[in-house]
Image (spheres, rainbow, N blue to C red):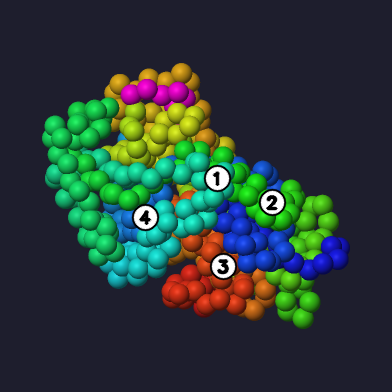
């Protein structure tokens, strides 16, 4: 056992690394543990966008009616491994139960404080470190076929406007002037100013982990299997390389947090939303900044390695390997949006987004156990990671966050 109690952060993705840095800046002794290298899990494979305006959940009104048609349409970017449906069904019923106006607004109000200052929070975390080199301030643009297609999304844009996000609309030939590489299938752009992106999410989180070590933090590669408690409070974590004593713990392992939450007496309705991306290496003919192509439900982001196109939703659990159909559809939609795209090669990736049934992350202490959690960010993990880490560090060091933390309380599932 380690002789000196300290804080253990489990999970070296964006949330865990951010938490570890903010704790070290507060003078706390921290060990960061992950079974792999920092930034090589879910934090590696996202679209890389710092999407301040992405506070509207997927479960908008009408999803229950449209969902079955989406799942059966081979040209819609929603896939289901039908053999997994019996296991998925209990979560799915709870998830779709939030597809109404009242819940959508409640969830959006909960997500807004986590993401609305995302770019600012990334700069606060990374500026003055080598990780800052990966951050690019930019527009974030939503591409539609025409004004009618944009207006069809009026409900989502209405919620964004209520949160203070008003797009600049560009149509017709002006859309091509703004982004010359867009194909004729796009005729209307909704441009969000003051956003940003990360040129290499995996490299960025890895650089943040180096900064954590430069601050005196300890990085350890192991898998955490269980907690040990003394008088109801965590006193050690049990790992594949042996036990480590601690005064408190942060659990930030995304969808893999669920088994350890059961050890704490909470069964979290959490599923993996299997995400896909293709990197078009050394690409020419792509966009100069991130573009969300509404028709194909994917985001194209220029990165250090080439153009990363990320999107597609698949439900099929943690154990199955990648499916061929999502990659094929993604390539088809990319070609339609950017017909002049050329690349030296292509790299495929498939990973796991942590999707709670109510679309809100879990942030806070579990019932006085000394175990704090930060996971379940669904599509907003990269954007909201630094803010989440800062909030957890504030709570752990006795500073009350200047916002309502009730929407993220993990105890909400004890009441469910």
Query: Which of the marked residues, 2 or 3, is nearer the chain's N terminus?
Result: 2
Q: Gap in Å between the C-alphas at discs 1 and 2? A: 13 Å
Q: Which residues are magenta?
A: 278-285
Q: Earlier in the sequence, mark 4 or mark 3?
A: 4
As helix, strand or loop, the secondary structure at mark 1 comes to: helix
Label placed on residue 131: 1
Q: Is residue 375 magenta?
A: no
x and y percent of residue 269 in the render?
A: 52, 63
Residue 362 in view, yes or no = yes
Q: CA distance from mark 4 to mark 3?
A: 20 Å
Image position, residue 166 (x, y; %)? 23, 56
Q: Is residue 93 visible?
A: no
- Which residue of the protein is positioned furthest toward the front in this rendering? 128
Farthest residue to the bottom: give it.
Answer: 231
Badge 1 or badge 2: first in the primary sequence: 1
Instruction: Examine the structure image and report whether residue 279 is included in the region drawn in magenta.
Output: yes
Q: Callout 3: few (<14), some (14-19), or many (20+) C-alpha neighbours within 10 Å?
A: many
Q: Look at mark 2 in the image and give the residue it sits on.
A: 213
Label drawn at residue 52: 4
Question: In the rendered image, which residue does mark 3 sit on?
Answer: 392
- Secondary structure at numbered mark 3: helix
Mark 1 neighbour class, 10 Å CA radius: few under 14, some 14 to 19, many 20 or more = many
Q: Which one is in front in this view, the residue at disc 2 or the one at disc 3? A: 2
Nearest to the observer: residue 76 or residue 385: 385
**Mark positioned earlier in the residue sequence (1 or 4):** 4
Whole-Å distance between the Cαs marked 3 and 1?
21 Å
Mark 4 and 2 residues: CB-CB less than 8 Å, in contact? no
Which class describes the residues within 10 Å of circle 4: few (<14), some (14-19), or many (20+)?
many
Instruction: Report how far apart the C-alphas of labels 2 and 3 lie in the structure.
Output: 19 Å
> Which badge, 4 or 2, is on the more N-terminal residue?
4
Q: Tell me the residue at 28%/49% (across/down).
A: 192
């Amino acid at each position: 056992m380690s002789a000196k109690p300290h804080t253990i952060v489990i999970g070296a993705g964006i949330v865990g690394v951010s938490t570890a840095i903010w704790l070290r800046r507060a003078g706390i002794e921290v060990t960061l543990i992950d079974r792999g290298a920092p930034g090589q899990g879910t934090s590696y494979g996202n679209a890389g966008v710092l999407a301040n305006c992405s506070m509207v959940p997927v479960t908008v009104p009408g999803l229950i009616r449209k969902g079955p048609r989406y799942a059966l349409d081979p040209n819609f970017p929603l896939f289901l491994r039908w053999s997994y449906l019996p296991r998925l069904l209990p979560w799915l019923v709870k998830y779709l139960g939030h597809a109404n106006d009242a819940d959508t607004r409640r969830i959006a109000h909960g997500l807004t404080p986590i993401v609305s200052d995302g770019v600012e929070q990334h700069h606060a975390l990374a500026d003055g470190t080598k990780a800052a080199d990966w951050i690019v301030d930019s527009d974030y643009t939503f591409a539609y076929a025409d004004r009618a297609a944009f207006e069809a999304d009026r409900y989502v844009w209405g919620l964004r406007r209520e949160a203070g996000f008003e797009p600049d609309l560009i149509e017709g030939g002006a859309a091509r002037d703004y982004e010359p590489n867009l194909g004729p299938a796009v005729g209307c752009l909704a441009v969000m100013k003051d956003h940003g992106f990360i040129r290499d999410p995996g490299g960025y989180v890895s650089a943040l982990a180096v900064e954590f070590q430069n601050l005196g933090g300890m990085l350890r590669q192991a898998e955490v299997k269980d907690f040990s408690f003394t008088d109801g409070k965590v006193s050690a974590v049990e790992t594949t390389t042996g036990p480590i004593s601690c005064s408190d713990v942060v659990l930030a392992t995304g969808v893999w947090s669920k088994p350890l939450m059961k050890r704490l007496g909470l069964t979290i309705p959490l599923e993996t939303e299997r995400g896909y991306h293709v990197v078009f290496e050394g690409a020419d003919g792509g966009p100069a900044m991130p573009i969300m192509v509404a028709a194909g439900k994917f985001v194209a982001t220029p990165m250090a390695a080439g153009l990363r196109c990320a999107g597609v939703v698949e439900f099929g659990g943690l154990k199955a390997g990648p499916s061929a159909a999502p990659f094929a559809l993604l390539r088809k939609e990319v070609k339609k949006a950017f017909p002049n795209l050329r690349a030296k090669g292509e790299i495929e990736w498939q990973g796991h987004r942590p999707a709670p049934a109510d679309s809100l992350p879990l942030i806070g202490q579990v019932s006085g156990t000394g175990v704090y959690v930060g996971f379940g960010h669904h599509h907003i993990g990269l954007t909201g990671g630094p803010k989440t880490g800062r909030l957890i560090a504030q709570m752990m060091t006795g500073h009350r966050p200047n916002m309502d933390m009730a929407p993220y309380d993990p105890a909400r599932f004890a009441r469910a």
